[in-house]
Amino acid sequence: MYKKLSDNRVRCHVCNHRCLILDGKRGICGVRENRKGKLYSLVYGKIIAEHIDPIEKKPLYHFMPGSFSLSIATIGCNFKCLHCQNADISQISKEKPEDVKILGEEVKAQKIIQDALDGKCPSISYTYTEPTIFLEFALDCMKLAKEEGLRNVWVSNGYMTKETLDLITPYLDAANIDLKAFSEEFYRDICGAQLKPILENLIEIKKRRIWLEIATLIIPGKNDSEKELKQIAEFIKNELGDDTPWHVSRFFPHHEMQDVPATPIEKIYEAVEIGKKAGLKYVYPGNV
Ligand code: SF4
């Protein structure tokens, strides 16, 4: 999904970065490359991770509970989170997008569906890294999955464009989307992105009747003030509904955020209380 411009430049419209990409260069995610005015996905069918997980691990607690989900990913991400928990497969080169090594095993979409059926998984989750950046492969799997009666789940940062959301909506059954913070500063400085499009997408996903659960990793000193947690909880309650589950999880030092201590357990239970006080029916502590 891109637009061809003059001088063999292209504009990618898959996620809200809407990268302008010169000939021979890649977008921010490092996995889409402009070759003479044509934009190629370099990760189509290049699977870096494939596992069978409990659906609760996504985390989704209200969607097919007790079931297993075949979970897949390619490399790459459109965010640069300093605290990324899967940096070994998502943040392969942050110096230059062109340095991202396209690793992964060549797999056909049909094989993914067969693996889900063989593994008795009633759903497929597009997860671990960011499904938006492997949109074309995810979409092909989603279509085939539907033909076999399987459900599709996205675990995402929610930074897809409206156009991408339109493409996946007919095949998407459930999503767990991160609401990492409630400030533009956090998204800009820690993730290299913006908050506003994510809030808009969350409202849109809910409107489209896709099952939605929200996850927030609580990081000491970064997004853990009472005010910010209250803002997140109230946004969920007022804009998404009080039956939208909120998962508040403990942070552990990771990737480029080794200098920040793990979240005290009491902080997680404080967040649970804030969520409940705001009127949310389902608030779950994670990583405790
Ligand atoms: S998917 Fe990649 S290339 Fe496209 S807009 Fe997002 S970061 Fe840029």
Image (cartoon, rainbow, N blue to C red):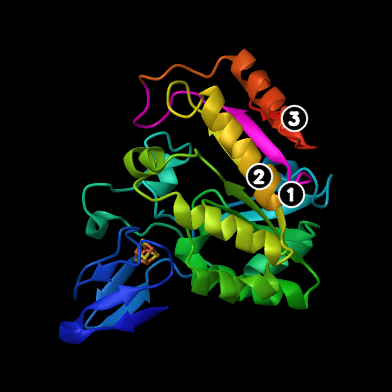
- Whichever of labels 2 and 1 marks the residue nearer the N terminus, that label is 2
- The amino acid type, in three-letter code, at marker 2 is Ile
- In the image, what residue type sits under mark 3? Lys
Residue pictured at 77% horizontal, 64% vertical: 117
Measured as percent of width and height from the top left, residue 74 is found at: 48, 58
Check contact, mark 1 vs mark 3: CB within 8 A: no
In the image, is residue 245 part of the stretch drawn in magenta?
Answer: yes
Q: Which mark is residue 103?
A: none
Where is residue 75? Give x, y as percent. 43, 55
Q: Quadrant of the C terminus?
A: top right
Tag 3 residue? 276
Can you say whether 135 is above or below 245 in the image? below
Above or below for 114 versus 272: below
The span picked out in magenta is 241-258
Q: Earlier in the sequence, mark 2 or mark 3?
A: 2
Magenta portion: prevailing SS class:
loop
**Label for residue 236?**
2
Circle count: 3
- Among all residues in the image, which is located at the extreme left? 7
The residue wearing badge 1 is: 241
Q: Mark 2 to mark 1: distance in Å?
A: 6 Å
Calculate the distance from the C-alpha at mark 2 to the C-alpha at mark 3.
11 Å
SS assignment at label 2: helix
Above or below for 7 versus 167: below
